[in-house]
Amino acid sequence: MSLARNQCSDIICSLADMRKLNDPRRAMMAFESMWRTIKRLRFIVVCISLIALAMFAQARNSALKTSAATSNGVVAKSAATISQSGCPLIFPDHPVAVAPNQPAVADRSTVGIVNALCDVTLDFIGCEFPPTSVTLGCDTNGDGVSDLTIPLKNITIINRLFFQATIPALASSPGTGFPLACCGGVAGITLTRNVGAGDDNVFGPFTETLTCSIDLGIRAPVVISATPSEGDCALGQNLLIPGSCFLLADGKPNVTSVFAVEIGNPANVIQAASVHILTSNLIDAFFQIGAASAGKTFLIFASGPNGTSRNLTALPPGAPIGCPLGNEQGVAVTFKCKSNSPGPADTPPPLPDVLACRLDRTATGAFTLTLSGKFQDGGVVSIGGVSFTKVKLKGFDSGTNRYSTMIVKGQVCSALPGNVVYTPPDSRPSSVLQCTERCTN
């Protein structure tokens, strides 16, 4: 810079000399000296510009490396391949709240957001284009293919390289943005931009898509209810517990214990004497609570290697305002011990006929709905108000003259999610189960 200032001084001096000189020859010599100085100054300006560009490029590369280094393991992998895949960095916009005894979600990580309370807003940094839609695909059966799609909402473009989108809480399960059939793992997130024809688009309408992978973490067990919900605790109580994610994708148990916690006295914890995982959606747990607990009410939990089921009595710190208590559906899962006070003997209510539902797919690609419970020949089943006659009964028990499994065939996808109503052939009342399963291509 000092050299440039010196060159400018030479030009000014040459102009002053030309004004003082009357001799044309000496004036011409002064002009030629000034012209040589101007050419040297142009060369200096070009060099300074090149140096500035090099410094800017070095600073930009350093900033990218620093950003990748400070990200978590999953994000760091994406940053390492950003030049090849074009995938942006993806992580929650704010700390994610989960239920007690569930794995915390690390800063700038998506691992564990499958357990998040209510909505989850994600940041996308370094995207190649601003999307018009964002969807998240969940692999529900562990075959590596996304078969359940979650559309994100509130896509907000912050700037050319940064936007946000929200995984919204579900209407059927307002405490979570993930359907109960989604038990986590690696998921595909797809960004789409639809561009229509217009005066500023000479190429005509077109669509851009980009699919990236994020790790949702493995979901903690989800407990929907416990049946029966009341009983004589002087006797052993056998509870049937429907839910989801009781088994991992490889068939290993995601539930290793079931326990009851007294409401108002969390130090009183009673473990189930035995636990049997019947399916990924149904557990049989046997409790021996004892006569001393008469009149008390207990919260029911299932726990395993990936955390404990949600059954909130208060929202944890950082939870979204308005997020419901209880489980993911906003229902407290409880069992009440009957009081010892004298009174007329009453007959315990019978167990419902339909206890759980599970959507399956045959080798030919057709969907079927498997119902667990107790069924008779001649019973009628409807889903979402639609009656189904193509059913197959399995698991006959000669002691009760009932079947434990019913497989419903036909157009089940058009009726799901919806209430499953089973009407037995005798005079007993119908049994209703809310089935949240849904078909995805």
Image (spheres, helix red, strand yellow):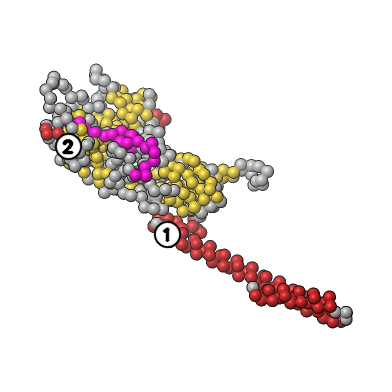
The picture places residue 263, in percent across and down from the top left corner, at 22, 36
**Label 1 environment density (alpha carbons within 10 Å; few <14, some 14–19, many ≥20):** few
Q: Residue at x 84, y 75 (%)?
A: 19
| Range of residues picked out in magenta | 317-337
Question: Which three-letter amino acid code belongs to the residue tagged 1?
Answer: Thr
Q: Earlier in the sequence, mark 2 or mark 1?
A: 1
> Which residue carries the number 2 mark?
286
The picture places residue 16, in percent across and down from the top left corner, at 80, 76
> Which residue carries the number 1 mark?
70
Q: Is residue 393 above or below residue 276?
A: above
In this orientation, which residue lies closer to the viewer: 42 or 216?
A: 42
Mark closer to the observer (2, 1): 1
Q: Residue at x 25, y 24 (%)?
A: 377
Q: Is residue 326 magenta?
A: yes
Q: Residue at x 60, y 67 (%)?
A: 52
Q: Residue at x 59, y 43 (%)?
A: 195
**Label 2 environment density (alpha carbons within 10 Å; few <14, some 14–19, many ≥20):** some
Q: Is residue 353 magenta?
A: no
In this orientation, which residue lies closer to the viewer: 288 or 16?
A: 16
Q: Does residue 251 appear anywhere in the picture?
A: no
